[in-house]
Amino acid sequence: MIKLYHYSNEDLKILNPAFFGNNYYTRSSQRQSGVKRLYFYLRPDQKEAFFNGAQFCYIVNINEAKLYNLNEDKLKLNDKPEDIFWNVKKRGYKGLIGSNGYPCAVLFYKTRPDKKVRLQ
């Protein structure tokens, strides 16, 4: 199992990728790929400064085998011209592990957090 950390100012019961692209910081990413997704960090002490003021941290535990590890990229999906998110999702993975400058993960499906921590 691996712990994933999602930050938000919204008080949520379910984390839903359907809202991806609604915020200005995800809008350009959404235009690049039509695959809706949730972003998580792998370490609570390593996240983009933008999220330092978030009100909530949602923690999700997931079997790491359900996530494609883009850092290892054993299937060489990063070498293909297709959208990496679509490529990973069509192979049956629940998401992927990679880096956006910080160790992070992406989930493609709604998920119920295992824990919610109020930060402020």
Image: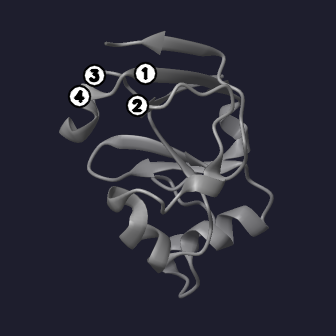
Q: CA distance from mark 2 to mark 4?
A: 11 Å
Q: Pointer 3: what residue?
A: 45
User: Which residue type does callout 2 highlight?
Assistant: Asn
Q: Pointer 4: what residue?
A: 52
User: Which residue type does callout 3 highlight?
Assistant: Asp
For the residue labelled by badge 1, is the local secondary structure a helix, a strand or a loop?
strand
Q: Which mark is residue 9?
A: 2
Taking the spot 65% from the left edge, 44% from the top edge, the residue there is 16
Tag 1 and tag 2, C-beta contact below 8 Å: yes
Image quadrant occupied by the N terminus: top right
- Residue closer to the observer: 14 or 89: 14
Give residue 10's position: percent from left, percent from top: 48, 31
User: Which residue type does callout 4 highlight?
Assistant: Asn
Q: CA distance from mark 4 to mark 3?
A: 10 Å
Give residue 85's position: percent from left, percent from top: 59, 67
Residue 78, above or below 6: below
Give residue 12's position: percent from left, percent from top: 60, 28
Residue 43 placement, left or right of 91 = left
